[in-house]
Image (cartoon, grey):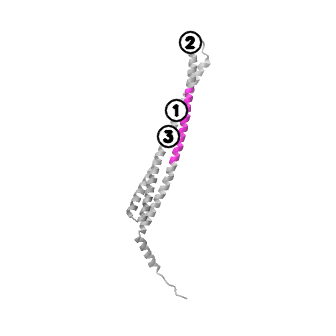
Amino acid sequence: MPEEIEIDTDKLHEAIHEEVEKEGGELLRTIALTTALFAAFAAVASLLAGGTVNEALALKTEATQLQAQASDQWAYYQAKGIKAVVFEAQKGVLASADKPVPPETEKNVARYKDEQQEAKKKAEELEHARDEKGKEADELIHQHHYFAYSVAMLQVAIALGAVAALTRKRLAWLGSTALGLIGAGIFVWALLLH
């Protein structure tokens, strides 16, 4: 039986480790780690950016519906006002002709004025609700912009991290890290806005 050849694996492992370190292995691992963290932040920021803009659009749609309902109430208000004026004119014509004014005419005038005031109140409430929805949507759009800025900064940081990995330049990695930290800071700021 032939004798087995022994290879000193400890020296081989040490030689491989030295070569990896010579070629920037530690830097590559660090670049990979920071780039992965920035990618995770970018994914969450992108998701939140999409969510906030979708919610803002839904609120803007609700505000538009409330505006349509308020417009309907204002039209109803005007119609009731016209009816009240018609009955008041009828009262005036009857009074000028020395004819008695039927009691229903007075009741109709009072009823239409009451209905007109109710329509006005309802229209103003709808407009207030519309304004609240619009304000809330504007705040979400504002927050969306911060998430979008965060995503942009993080994407540039990731791209610069790829350049740093390819060139093995520490300065490129430092630039990537700085941009990524700014992007992460904007992300946290956007979270605190809500």
Q: Is residue 103 left or right of residue 29?
A: right
Circles 1 and 3 in contact, beta carbons < 8 Å: no
Asked where in the image residue 180 lies, by quadrant, the reply is bottom left
Residue under label 3, please give it.
Answer: 134
Name the quadrant containing residue 165. Answer: bottom left
Judging from the image, what secondary structure is the residue with disc 3 in? Answer: helix
The structure residue drawn at horizontal position 43% and vertical position 63%, both measured from the top left corner, is 31
Q: Residue at x 52, y 41 (%)?
A: 60
Q: Residue at x 48, y 43 (%)?
A: 138
Q: Secondary structure at mark 1?
A: helix
Give the residues drawn in magenta, as a range.
52-79
Q: Position of residue 131 (x, y in %)?
A: 50, 38
Q: Taking the image as drawn, is residue 194 in sight?
A: no
Q: Amino acid at mark 3?
A: Gly
Instruction: Kindly report the distance in space between the C-alpha atoms of the residues bearing marks 1 and 3.
Output: 15 Å
Please say if 49 is above or below 172: above
Q: Residue furthest bottom?
A: 1
Give whichever of discs 1 and 2 has the lower sequence position.
Answer: 2
Residue 74 counted in the magenta span: yes
Disc 1 target residue: 124
Q: Which residue is mark 2?
A: 96
Alpha-carbon distance for marks 3 and 2?
52 Å
Q: Nearer the viewer, residue 123 or 158?
A: 158
Overall secondary structure of the magenta stretch? helix
Q: Which mark is residue 42?
A: none
* Farthest residue, direction top: 98
Q: Secondary structure at mark 2?
A: helix
**76 in the magenta segment:** yes
**Label 1 environment density (alpha carbons within 10 Å; few <14, some 14–19, many ≥20):** some
- Tell me, yes or no, if residue 170 can be seen here: yes
Q: Position of residue 175 (x, y in %)?
A: 39, 59
Q: Residues within 10 Å of mark 3 (few under 14, many from 20)?
A: many
